[in-house]
Structure formats: structure tokens, C-alpha cells
Image (cartoon, rainbow, N blue to C red):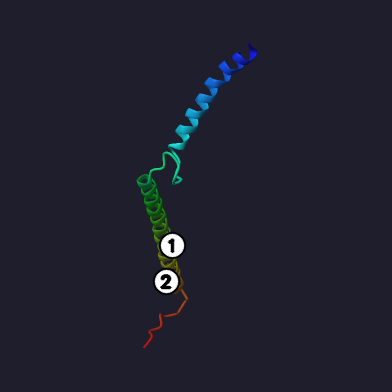
Amino acid sequence: MKWLIFLAVVLPSGAMASMLNNSNALQTNQPFKPGYNASTQRMQNQMRNQQQNQQLKLQQEQQQMQQKIQEQRDQAQQRTIQLQPGNQTTPQNNP
């Protein structure tokens, strides 16, 4: 009698575990497993690559902008030094 009660409890939970396992398998990204979708995987890879390329481009643009700002600061500092009273430095013309 105890075995019958044990089976009555274990069998439904085993079936539920199997259902949960199958639903997780549908979301996998590994070939040859149930639920693997090659076109979805390709799209995810393309989107990931596009995002990485956009991040790289943004970083490069930020570096260029920082360099331009630094150049402008340096030029402004040189003009300020040249325009100070008592400073007789003149810009040198390169022949």
C-alpha cells in the first residue's frame, strides 16, 4: 500500500519535471538539441555583431572628439600666453 501511495506522488512530479525540461530545451542555442533554431541563432549573432561594431564606432568617435577638444584647449592656452601683457612672443612663420 505504501508503494502505491509513493508511486501516486512520484509519477505526477516526474511528468512535470519532464515537461519543464522540454520547455527549457526549446530555448537552447545548441545544434542537434530539441528547440534549436538556426535562423534565430543567426539573427542573434548578427545583432550581437552589429551591437559590438556600433560600440566600437562610438568609442572611436568619442576618442576623436576628446582629441579635438584637447587640441582646442591647447590652442586657446597658447593664444592666452601670447596675448598676455609683457609677452613679446610672436608666432613664428615657417618658410
Q: Residue at x 40, y 54 (%)?
A: 49
**Disc 2, disc 1: CB below 8 Å?**
no
**How many circles with numbers are drawn on the protein?**
2
Against 27, residue 45 (above or below) is below
The spot of residue 46 in percent (x, y) is 37, 52
Q: Marks 2 and 1, how far apart in space?
A: 24 Å
Which corner quadrant holds the C terminus? bottom left
- In front of the other: 44 or 95: 44
The spot of residue 23 in percent (x, y) is 45, 32
* Kind of element beneath mark 1: helix
Against 72, residue 21 (above or below) is above
Residue type pointed to by label 1: Gln
* Kind of element beneath mark 2: helix
Q: Residue at x 54, y 22 (%)?
A: 13
The spot of residue 68 in percent (x, y) is 40, 65
- Mark 2 neighbour density, 10 Å: few (under 14) some (14–19) many (20 or more): few
Q: Residue at x 41, y 39 (%)?
A: 35
Q: Quadrant of residue 26?
A: top left
The spot of residue 19 in percent (x, y) is 47, 28
Which corner quadrant holds the N terminus? top right
Residue picked out by circle 1: 63
Q: Earlier in the sequence, mark 2 or mark 1?
A: 1
| Circle on res. 4 | none
| Circle on res. 79 | 2
- In front of the other: 85 or 82: 82
- Observer-side mark, 2 or 1, equals 1
